[in-house]
Image: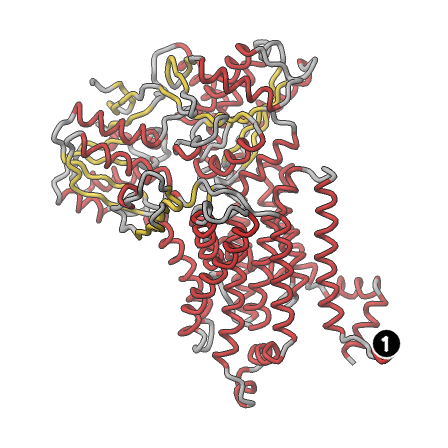
Amino acid sequence: MKKVISLVMVMALVMCLMAGCGSTNETADPTEAPAEAEAEAEVETASEGGSFYIGGIGPITGDNAIYGMAVMNGAQIAVDEINAAGGINGYTVEYKFEDDVADGETAVNAYNNLMDWGMQVLVGPTTTGSAISVSAKVYEERVFALTPSASSPDVTAGKDNMFQLCFTDPNQGSGSAVYMGANMPEAKVAVIYRNDDAYSQGIRDTFVAEAANQNLEVVYEGTFTEDTATDFSVQLTAAQAAGADLVFLPIYYQPASVILAQANAMGYAPTFFGVDGMDGILTLEGFDTSLAEGVMVLTPFSATAEDELTQNFVAEYSARYGETPNQFAADGYDCVYALKQAMENAGCTPDMSAEEICNAMVEQFTSMSFSGLTGTDMTWSAAGEVSKMPVAVMVKDGVYVTAEA
Amino acid sequence: MKLKSRKLKKTTVIDFATYIGVILAFIIMNTLKSQGMLTRSLTGQLIPICCYIVMAVSLNLTVGILGELSLGHAGFMSVGAFSGIVAAMSLQSVIPSEALRLAIALVVGAIFAAIAGTLVGIPVLRLRGDYLAIVTLAFGEIIKELINCLIIGVDEAGLHVINATGTKSVNDLGLSEAGRVLIKGAQGATGTQTIASFTAGFILIMISLVIILNLVRSRSGRAIMALRDNRIAAESVGINVTKYKMMAFVTSAALAGAAGALYGLNFSNLVATKFDFNTSILVLVFVVLGGLGNIWGSIIAATVLTILPEALRGFADYRMLIYAIVLILVMLATNNPQLKALFAKLIPVRKGENVNGQA
């Protein structure tokens, strides 16, 4: 008995250790440390008369680390740019990002930790589950929060000081259905989604509801879970047998890459249609981008856009972190600039309490319009949802191009 | 005068020391909290710590005292958490008192987890070997998948429940206008009113301690420990194996359910994947690190190991690595004969007591 227990314990410890190693390798990016050190030095020299304390929460270790890292890096670039350009209303910005492993309990701990640090405004949390847990706390304690990427309507529901910069899940689901209805009428649609994931399930629900109004026929629905995300031959065969000529994938890009590869191998070539989680598929290591040819994605951000703002951001991000930024990095960047704009309009100063800033922010966000990387003339409803136009892009010759509507 | 001459048994002294320690810790933390001397980070962790203590103490009953390995303790926590949330949220309009609703939620959570424990226990506890470990491991995974498909809503007509096969959504619940959805499948329970309190956590710990310590020191408890030490010998003196195993296992499951309900009502969002295999192992780590069969050890281990990852935030990306190293070091240190001898030298009085107690 004792032997069995000790064996299990040893296994658990080894797993802990490996998880720790994996994440540290990922995050120990040589380019990152000097950048952070520089930023800190800058803040120290420039901070006279106080700084704004902006906190961030997201997973920078564990399975979802890629999203938290992107948001953290994107926001860090924005903060450094703002500090270099003289700060907000002449005050510098201090930025601190805490890890939450995409877990609600840890996210609340991270939030409390940031409040001990003196946080005045929160950029986060990154993932939906964490955001819902933290949103109850920020509502209770009157701290303004702008989440870059938590897309469920439950995040903002009933809380006047919690705002979103990304599309909500219903927007993405019904938006996709409306787009398909307008551009691919009478398509036979198959949906493959992950039914143990809030994001995927949420988009699928609203998509199916709207598809009925758009005269789209959903001929097949296939599900998978975290544990079965390595083989999709069953779902693809069924979708093919049902005669689907359009496959809607409201999922993240890692499983999507497997689906594309397997569909190609079995000679099944429908039009694949993704949402913002699909963004990043072209930069996935070891992925043959020719497989993604013709894939359509509904996304607010494209790294190949021609405008100057995007070009500069992509160049800076690639130089610092050695990869092309995805939509999450752009969301993090936009969050900080949206806050800057609102704080400047309201004339905030660092000696204001979190609650005073919160009240000013709520007023500003519901009345202002903001243009950034992920959209122009964004406005926010009183409920905290952003209104911006999604853009359908299509992969052509390994890059995103705007799809013809 | 008679009382004075009668010396208390060593186990009784330890039990009372455990009660007093928990009460003192509660009073100190509560005073510090009301004086505003605790960091927010620590204040926020008080209720989860209470939950993990109850989890560890209850798992210790199965693993340490009954001697059966359970790898699905988080499954019982999950059952308790979601049934507790449904109870508390659906009674929102009927019972305005938060404390009463919380108490009801804890009881409902305990009952549902006890039912789950009975269902698992009836077939499995009759077997010999490590079957319980395998079945509880599977149980934890099955519960996770089941709750991932569960959609529950409430309106004036009562509860609406569907166990979706993947094709049904919230709209199929058929709720009226005033209704609200409590559990949305994979999206979990969202918008839960957070009514858990530190005082409730303390009371739950005390109740668990009273139940477990009294069970262990009773006639039944001795029968349970006899089964652990030698099943054949225990059977030969007429101890009903299945009955006593069930008694310990179901008690353990029920307490885990109550802890789960408290945990669930402390967060406004809870997903089923929170209670996965890792959480079960985490609780098992508390138990093994605190010492098998050692109740106060479990309490300390659960507290320290819950605070540790947060206290290590200063190490940023390396914190989980350091957490693992600390665990290994503690394991090595507590089993090191030289260190044990050193502690014995440092505390000679206690050593003397031990000798007397054993003699």
Question: Number of marks in the image?
Answer: 1
Subunit of label 1: B
Residue sitting at x 39%, y 46%: B183
Q: Is residue B31 left or right of residue A176?
A: right
- Pick the quarter of the image with the C terminus of chain A: top left
> Is residue B8 in view from this perspective?
yes
- Residue B313 at what x, y percent from top left? 62, 38
Q: Is residue A39 visible?
A: no
Q: Residue at x 71, y 40 (%)?
A: B38
Q: Image quadrant of residue B353?
A: bottom right
Answer left or right for A324 relative to B18.
Answer: left
Q: Is residue B118 left or right of residue A252?
A: right
Q: Which residue is mark 1?
A: B4
Give SS at disc 1: helix
* Image quadrant assignment for residue B3: bottom right
Residue A191 x/y as whole percent: 23, 39
User: What residue is shown at x 43% (from left), y 32% (from top)?
Assistant: A157
Callout 1: few (<14), some (14-19), or many (20+) C-alpha neighbours within 10 Å?
Answer: few
Choose top left, top right, bottom left or bottom right for residue B330.
bottom right
Q: Nearer the viewer, residue A376 or B118?
A: B118
Q: Is residue A106 above or below residue A342?
A: below
Residue B13 % position (x, y)? 76, 69
Q: Is residue A133 above or below residue B234?
A: above
Q: Nearer the viewer, residue A64 or A198?
A: A198
